[in-house]
Image: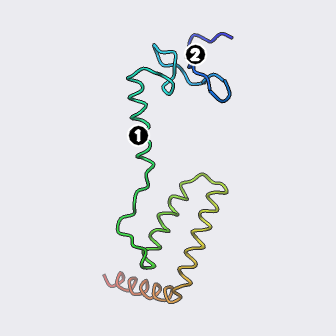
């Protein structure tokens, strides 16, 4: 099987498990791809990329949240819901959002007075906006 002139050369490495050849394009001047190259400069770039990827995946704490009040809990649920909405539509996303909604309902049920107090605050705020 021959390759077209504009088609890049493939990496010469093979998979240990399947024995199939790597499908990634070979780097110019090297018979291997970015991930299989033994060139010291490429290795340094690869190691740097792996470290950066690991740092990007670290969980970032939500500043100032203690989970002591309903407001704190709603803030965390809001952040989690935002993350969940960023997922592709599917079963996982539906389970996550359903679980968050159920948790929010339990928090509301634990403080039945919360809805009434919120309605009073909204009414008071609307009254202040009309006066200004």
Q: Residue furthest front?
A: 16
Query: Colour mode?
Result: rainbow
Q: Which mark is residue 62?
A: none
Q: Position of residue 15 (x, y in %)?
A: 62, 26
The residue lying at 52 percent from left, 63 percent from top is: 81
Q: Position of residue 34 (x, y in %)?
A: 48, 25
The residue lying at 57 percent from left, 10 percent from top is: 5
Alpha-carbon span between mark 1 and mark 2: 31 Å
Q: For this rendering, which residue is in front, 66 or 123?
A: 66
- Left/right placement of residue 103 relative to residue 55 reads right
Q: Position of residue 69 (x, y in %)?
A: 42, 79
Q: For this rendering, which residue is in front, 43 or 128?
A: 43
Q: Which residue is mark 1?
A: 51
Q: Which residue is mark 2?
A: 7
Secondary element type, mark 2: loop
The residue lying at 57 percent from left, 68 percent from top is: 100
Q: Position of residue 67 (x, y in %)?
A: 43, 74
Relative vertical location of residue 63 with respect to residue 48 in this rendering, above or below? below
Quarter-of-image position of residue 68: bottom left
């Amino acid at each position: 099987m021959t390759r077209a002139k504009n088609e890049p050369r493939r990496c010469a490495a093979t998979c240990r498990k399947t024995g199939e050849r790597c499908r990634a394009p070979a780097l110019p001047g090297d018979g291997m791809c970015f991930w299989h190259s033994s060139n010291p400069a490429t290795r340094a770039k690869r190691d740097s990329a792996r470290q950066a990827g690991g740092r990007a995946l670290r969980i970032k704490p939500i500043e100032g949240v203690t989970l002591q009040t309903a407001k704190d809990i709603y803030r965390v649920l809001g952040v989690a819901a935002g993350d969940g909405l960023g997922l592709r539509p599917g079963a996982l996303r539906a389970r996550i959002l359903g679980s968050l909604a159920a948790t929010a309902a339990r928090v509301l049920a634990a403080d039945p007075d919360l809805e009434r107090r919120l309605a009073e605050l909204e009414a008071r705020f609307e009254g202040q906006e009309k006066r200004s």
